[in-house]
Image (tube, coloured by chain):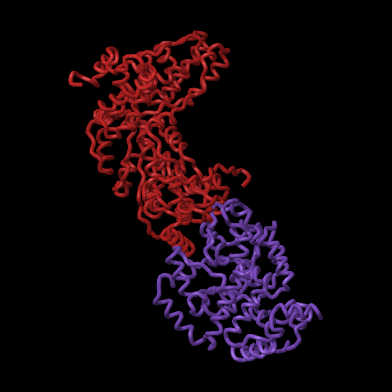
Chain colours: A red, B purple
Amino acid sequence: MDRFTDISIPADYRDKQLPEFSGNPLAEALPDLLTDEDLAVMLAREPYYKSSDRLLSAEMRVDMTQRLYDFHQPMPQDIDIARRIFRCIRWGYVNRNPLASAQVSDLNARYAALRDGAKTLPVIHRPNVSGFTIIGISGIGKTCTLEGILSLYPQVISHTCYKDSPFVMKQIVWLKLDCTFDGSIKGLCAGFFSSLDRLLGTEYYRMYTSRHNTVDTMMNMMTQLASIYGIGLLVIDEIQHLSTAKSGGQEKMLNFFVTLVNTIGLPVVLVGTPKALPILQSEFRQARRGSGQGDLLWDSMQNGIMWKMFVRSMWKYQYTRETVPFSDEMADALYNESGGIPFLAVTIYKLVQEDAILMKKETFTPKDIRRVTSEKMRLTEPMRKALLSGKDVDIYRYADIRPFTGRDHLEAAAVTGDTVSRDPVQNTAKEDPVGRAVKTLLGMDVSYQDAFRCVMAASSCLGQTADAKKLAKEAYRIYLEPEKQNKETDAGDLRNMQDYESLKKGGVVGGEL
Amino acid sequence: MAMLPVFPAPYPEECFYSILSRAFIRNGYLSDAEFIITLFGKHMNMRHMILTPYGVHHCSHWVPPGSGITAGKLLLDHTCAQYGVLPSHPSVISKIRNETVNGISNPFHAVSRMIRFRTQSFADHLRFCPLCILKDAEKYGEPYWHRIHQIRETVYCPTHSVPILNSSVPLLSYLLTGNHFFPASYVMDDLVKGGLEMAGALIDSARPKMPACRELHLILDKDIQFLLSNGFSLSETRSLFERFKSRLDQEGTGGDAEANRLVMEQKLHEHFNPEFQKLILGFSHYAQNFYKFIDRKKEYTNTPYLPTVMCVLGMECLSGSAEAFYHETEKR
């Protein structure tokens, strides 16, 4: 109990303007929806940096390169995941109003089943949202992105009074657990109880992990507690650990997640590396049918415009005495050494700076990037080579980082009912108007940060169905807006020669405009 | 003791024990003893929480300020304190009222010291009105234990005028119920599922065992209901006794004390069991002795407790009104 620190925030009820959420304190206490632009700004993580740091001693600068790990550049993928997560949380509460008599009745029925020693709890809830699955190669930034997204919502909301009536409840908006290294259910349940104790100051871990409690009891208690505290979303990370579970363990745990959805309507998000794909596809397929949010296969980045945007954003965090300018060559070198995995790229960028400072060169070249990587990242070398070579025989040895095949995409689509192209690369390009719009703006000499910000703003104005051309056009209009205000007395016409040429160059306007 | 992550909003007329039983479920406990320790920091006999305000002062540890759930409110609206203190001397009642209603740090000490709650007031079982159970289950999604149903001298449900029945949970066996939670939703599950048909059958099966004087009991039960909510304020204004008097007036028997006494004696003969008649009539014209009796003076410590409503009636019977009763006993 001593370790308990109350992190809850008091409930602030807001009209959600949708009848489904009205009268439900759990839904009304959630923050309002964010625009894509706000999301892009809020998900970005920029480490503390000032250029005068370059004048500090070598030891200090080497130490400060550690700050690079705080860097996070939101990608369109992040916005997509954020939207899905917020949708799951909000709509997951629709059928879960603690003030509704049906909900109270369900809670009591589950208590009666527990008290009478039933092995399973009654399935009496109609789930509204079921959650989704994120599979991405190791180091792509799944956990970092998820934690960033989840942190936009308060984890615990403290209710005391709703509409002038007492309503004392701690609502857990989201909970992220890691699948245990051995994929055991008992370990997962223990982690759940422990997390609740940390958030609420309770003693569930001591009460329910004792030797005389069976796994079934623990699972049932977990279900009941998840319902009691109105958990909005349960995220299970490192789901690939299920591959090491004992015989029957995989199936049991995946069935348990389905039970959570069916019994109390709790949306569950499973996150893992491609190693988890065979497990999910073999055991979970039937259960995942009807998933409302679709599944997400998160591949390593392509060496395209988004990669350059990522490297460019990271590039300013330099601690060498001499400024090393960003170039496509540098971005290519980082790509080739990291295999398009952002985490590895950050590490390489950090290491190459450390090397330059310690070797007193105070600058570096693409050649240094290759050298430092081969010297200091030997452990990951076979995996990176396998990733870049694209050869199945190598890749399957390192299942955590194997890229997705067209078959994987089709398998995922079969589960979610989506239609996809057989070619994942083509598919990504086809379905990513944001990326294409950003690329268009970059071609007009708009900075990477501004391009991304404006495209996100345009996306929130036009909706997610807008095509790349419309997005780019709107984004460029947004980009020019402050400039337009500043130049109120100037020509005031967007079609001044320079801008018009830029639009034309980017293919946004043509002769017909 | 710790702040509870969930504390259920009390339902109208719900007894304190029932609120705690629901809190037991809402907080995800399976062990009664664990939850009692969480609530009170030590083992407690939960049976006391059925009628008395035993332990309400811990409320400030369980719920955050601003929720509207306070020890004072629990005391007034969810325990039988207002009813239980009635036979006490008006000055005592006034003191309790001031200390509890007007907010003192620990109402428990004041009330539990002075309250005249008798073990005899406990019924044999947790009790319920079948129609209340069904109504509550429909309205709130769960039934709960009403405080008035737990008072032994309440025979009929003042709301539905049907017999109050014993549940399957006995109260007299300490070992069985002393430190256990029996939420009504769990105990009454069959009735809720059985609906009106089952409720009707239960009521019909109870009718033959009910006392013949249904009308009088209904009046008394409504009085008990009234006293439960207004005991403290009535003790100051004395309108409680006026109310009793007007009740007699309505029956054409109001007026002087002697007439009242005779009517009461007659009613006692007609409607109450011989044991009670013997007890009250034994005090005839000896208000001082009756005072000693209800005040549990040492010569009466081994005699049975008298239900509150009977004490009030006894005062009326002996002195014409409770005010006159106390006036008389004080003079002596």
Nearer the observer, B262 or B39: B262
In the displayed orientation, state which residue is furthest to the left: A512
Q: Is residue A251 left or right of residue B168?
A: left
Q: Quadrant of the C terminus of chain B?
A: bottom right
Nearer the observer, A471 or B98: B98
Question: In the displayed structure, would residue B266 be above or below residue A124?
Answer: below
Q: Position of residue B144 (x, y in %)?
A: 51, 67
Q: Is residue B59 left or right of residue B157?
A: right
Residue A251 showing in the rendered view? no
Q: Number of marks in the image?
A: 0
Question: In the displayed structure, would residue B246 be above or below residue A370?
Answer: below
In the displayed orientation, state which residue is furthest to the front: B255
Q: Position of residue B22 (x, y in %)?
A: 53, 61
Residue B309 showing in the rendered view? yes
Question: In the displayed structure, would residue A213 be above or below residue B191?
Answer: above
Q: Quadrant of the N terminus of chain B?
A: bottom right
Query: In which quadrant of the rendered view does residue A441 lie?
Result: top left
Q: Is residue B332 left or right of residue A90?
A: right
Q: Position of residue B136 (x, y in %)?
A: 46, 67
Nearer the observer, B173 or B222: B222
Nearer the observer, A418 or B5: B5
Q: Position of residue B104 (x, y in %)?
A: 70, 58
Q: Residue at x 63, y 45 (%)?
A: A2
Query: In which quadrant of the rendered view does residue B283 lie?
Result: bottom right
Q: Residue at x 33, y 37 (%)?
A: A296
Q: Residue at x 49, y 14 (%)?
A: A355
